[in-house]
Image: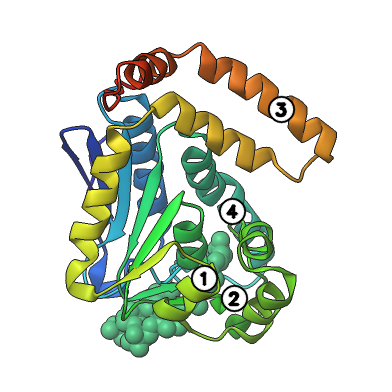
Amino acid sequence: MSFNLVILERQDAIGKITLNRPERLNALCRPLLQELRGALEALAEDRSVRAVVLTGEGRGFCAGQDLSEPALHEGAGIDEEVALSLDRYYHPVLLAIADMEKPVIAQVQGVAAGAGCNLALACDIVVAGESATFLQAFTRIGLVPDCGGSWILPRLVGSARAKALMLLAEEVPASEAERIGLIYRCLPDGELAAGAQALAQRLAQGPTKAYGLIKQALKESGAEGYGAQLDLERDLQKQAAASGDFREGITAFAAKRPPRFSGS
Ligand code: T3D
């Protein structure tokens, strides 16, 4: 697959995807979503990549659905088009992030709005520059939060705040987003790229299989009762215990040296 609307880069064990429509604040049109899916799948399959950074080119991270897309202006059948777009273009992207074993870091500068906000929040760790803002823009145009917003927001910030964010569609500055637990960390704008890179480097040297199993445990938590979650944790721990990184971890502990994880 060739990439024009996203930039795909690999350096050492880190894969980087940059949304590349800066003139539209990286608004998500269908061709971009197809490329984004392709890039995520390529990095998921690349065993040399052990952490991924997702960011946007220019002054914004992503302004959500491209509201100028012709399919949204055709009158009759627009509801079917929107549902199809979510099924066919958005959900594969979001599931590719959720199902990927390796951790995905969102590096957010400027605005993350609508589906762009929930794309960032779908990543495993979100770091943002201090001038970044998070906006559940959906009700501003008469829509409801999609792209997992109604699932992730109450888990991150609790039901009361999640409802207010979704109903009021107010911009949340990055510092506030960190304070309420919407994101992991707000950094000075000038330190954002280096901060995201440092996190990615650290994760790329970690126990990749354990990270993947943690993602799986969190994704499924709450779907079943407490007892079922204990059973799931047992099953995932069994898989982690079978990994080379676990063997390295206990060997390194016994030898009183730092572990050298290989991701195996
Ligand atoms: O089909 C489906 O699947 C439906 C799914 C829907 C999911 C969603 O994401 S719904 C929510 C869609 N997004 C929005 O409603 C946000 C729309 N944008 C804005 O409200 C503002 O642009 C921002 C608050 C994000 C940023 O404001 P500001 O003042 O910093 O920038 P701007 O001047 O408004 O935007 C800069 C340019 O980007 C501008 O183009 P121009 O005038 O310079 O030629 C603007 O039109 C364009 N742009 C911004 N957002 C979008 C966009 N173009 C297309 N789609 C956009 N979403």
Q: Which residue is mark 2?
A: 138
Counting residues from the start of the chain, the first of labels 4 and 3 encountered is: 4
Q: Disc 2 marks which amino acid? A: Phe
Location of residue 62 (image quadrant): bottom left
The answer as to whether callout 4 falls within 8 Å of ligand 1 is yes
Q: Position of residue 84 (x, y in %)?
A: 61, 52
User: Does residue 201 appear in the picture of this structure?
Assistant: yes
Instruction: Report the residue at 68% width, 22% height from top.
Output: 234
Q: Earlier in the sequence, mark 3 or mark 2?
A: 2
Q: CA distance from mark 1 to mark 3?
A: 33 Å
Among the two numbered marks 1 and 3 on one chain, the one whose residue lies closer to the N terminus: 1
Q: Is residue 144 above or below residue 213?
A: below
Mark 4 vs mark 3, CA separation in Å: 29 Å
CB atoms at circles 3 and 2 under 8 Å apart?
no
Mark 2 residue CB less than 8 A from any atom of ligand 1: yes
The mark nearer the N terminus, 2 or 4, is 4
Residue 188 location, x and y as percent?
A: 25, 75
The CB of the residue at mark 1 lies under 8 Å from ligand 1:
yes
Per the model, the C-alpha gap separating discs 2 and 4 is: 14 Å
Residue at (44%, 59%) from the top-left corner? 120
Question: Circle 1: is it few (<14), some (14-19), or many (20+) Cα within 10 Å?
Answer: many
Q: CA distance from mark 4 to mark 1?
A: 13 Å
The residue at which mark 4 appears reads as 86
Between circles 3 and 2, the one closer to the viewer is 3
For this view, does 53 lie left or right of residue 155? left
Q: Amino acid at mark 3?
A: Leu
**Mark-to-mark CA distance, 3 and 2:** 35 Å
Query: Is the residue indicated by label 3 positioned so its CB lies within 8 Å of ligand 1?
Result: no
Amino acid type shown at disc 4: Leu
The residue beneath circle 1 is 114
Q: Are marks 1 and 3 in contact (CB under 8 Å)?
A: no
Q: Nearer the viewer, mark 1 or mark 3?
A: 3
